[in-house]
Image (cartoon, coloured by chain):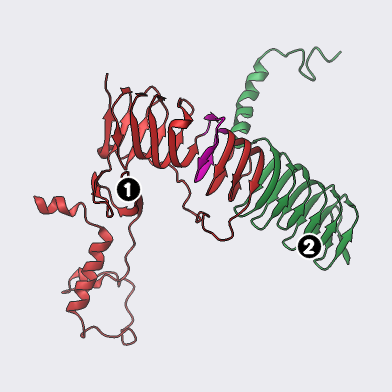
Chain colours: A red, B green
Amino acid sequence: MPDREKAEFLDGYAVIKAARRAAGKEKEGSRPKKAERKPEPADSQRPAEGKSPGLHIRHTVRPPTHEIICYECGYSFRLTGKAQRTFCPRCRVILDMTDYSIETVWHQPIKTCGRIRLAPHAVVENAELVAGEIILEGTVKEGKLRALRVLEIHPRARFDLSQVHTRDLRIASGAVVRSRQPVTAENIEVSGKLEGRIQATGRIIIHVGGLVKGELSGPHLVVEEGGGLRARCAIVPDTAGATAAEPGTGPAIARPAAAGNTRRCSSG
Amino acid sequence: MMMNFESDTITQSLIHSQVEITGTVKTEGSLRIDGKLKGDLECGGDAVIGKSARIEGNLVVNSVSVAGQVNGNITARDRIEMKSSAKVTGDIKAKRLAVEDGVTFIGRSEVTPTGPTAETQANTRAPKTESEPPSRDAKGGIFTKK
């Protein structure tokens, strides 16, 4: 059924808006004004008998959207619902949105707007991984990682930081990251230990039990009580707000991957 | 203008926003500063640096909440809290630190993490140490008491 397949990619909010628009056109002129409306009973959410339920949608909840960043042109847009593929509105490239879970040795490149999880015993060799979110628990040998949104580093992760590019960096509890070269990201969340020269253009958040050592510079710093900070700091908020991150746009907590949309990757 | 509010146990002092003090301020109780202080502050209790406060000097306190401007080092025996309006230029040292988004902080920080994870680890270790034989270094152990 081609119609059903098409319907999976439709925006739910857009459908509701279209229904309301259609209802408005049908009822144009005949709809009473707000002041003339009679007080409604308590169970007014139910449509009146004999009338179509689509004509009486008054309050709708905007469905949650998630950010998609095109791995070809870098364009960022928001999308509701789940899909395995979508189009980039700017460059018109078909974007893969599948979540991958690598559990053994892996040699092939992956490009996805979804999530890649490297299991603790997984090894990536000579491959470039590009994903919206990378959860790094395994080892990366001679490979490149590019996280379009978030890179999450876990305690067993082994990698070369110079081969990693990410917008937001998240260091999980128990993970230790030491770097001689500067660690640069937009938002940095530390629940483990981060040592080095840290430069953030957005917000640095040190959670309970987290520790930052070395040098720290950026416009925003948040330290939860119980977090450690043993560093030379230069925290100067950008008053113009050009690089300042909006509240709530920081790295979010990782959600478990949807079982139906996750591919397991394994190769000899 | 200086006002003292004395209760049975705690003494809280207030330096009003129109007051400017040059010199060292020492108190054993709690203190709130909304004015200007050119000098050091030694506070045995808790100090509150209000939004309109400006301090040019070092602070030695038990715990402090900073919402104003401090040009100097802050040493707290317990806790430093920086509100979003705080502007601190100087080194800070404390057992615990809480920083809100929006602060301006230029200086060195010396705060070691003390989270619930550390506390839970300590709690889980506690029963083990009871079952273990006492060491020579343990205070109050059988080797130290005669």
In the depicted view, which residue is nearer to us: A236 or A263?
A: A236
- Badge 1 crowding class, 10 Å Cα cut-off, few under 14, some 14 to 19, many 20 or more, is few
Whether residue A187 is in magenta: the answer is yes
In the depicted view, which residue is nearer to us: B45 or A22?
A: A22
Task: Find the distance from the CA under tag 2 to the CA under tag 1.
Answer: 52 Å
Picture layout, residue B6 above or below residue A88: below
Whether residue A45 is in magenta: the answer is no
**Range covered by the magenta-colored residues:** A173-194
Decide if residue B83 is in sight here.
Answer: yes
Report in which chain the residue with disc 2 lies.
B
Q: Is residue A22 left or right of residue B70?
A: left
Tell me the tag on residue B117.
none
Which numbered mark, 2 or 1, is in the foreground of this view? 1
Picture layout, residue B107 above or below residue B14: above
Tag 1 residue: A73
Decide if residue A227 is in sight here.
Answer: no
Report in which chain the residue with disc 1 lies.
A
In the depicted view, which residue is nearer to us: A142 or A190?
A: A142
Q: Residue at x 76, y 56 (%)?
A: B49
What amino acid type should be assigned to the residue bearing mark 2? Asp
Q: Residue at x 50, y 56 (%)?
A: A246
Task: Give how far across and how far down residue A108 sits, in percent.
Answer: 28, 27
Tag 2 residue: B34
The image quadrant of residue A121 is: top left
Q: Is residue B67 left or right of residue B24?
A: left
What amino acid type should be assigned to the residue bearing mark 1? Cys
Q: Are marks 2 and 1 on the same chain?
A: no
Task: Give how far across and how far down residue A17 sits, in percent.
Answer: 26, 67
The quarter of the picture where the C terminus of chain B appears is: top right
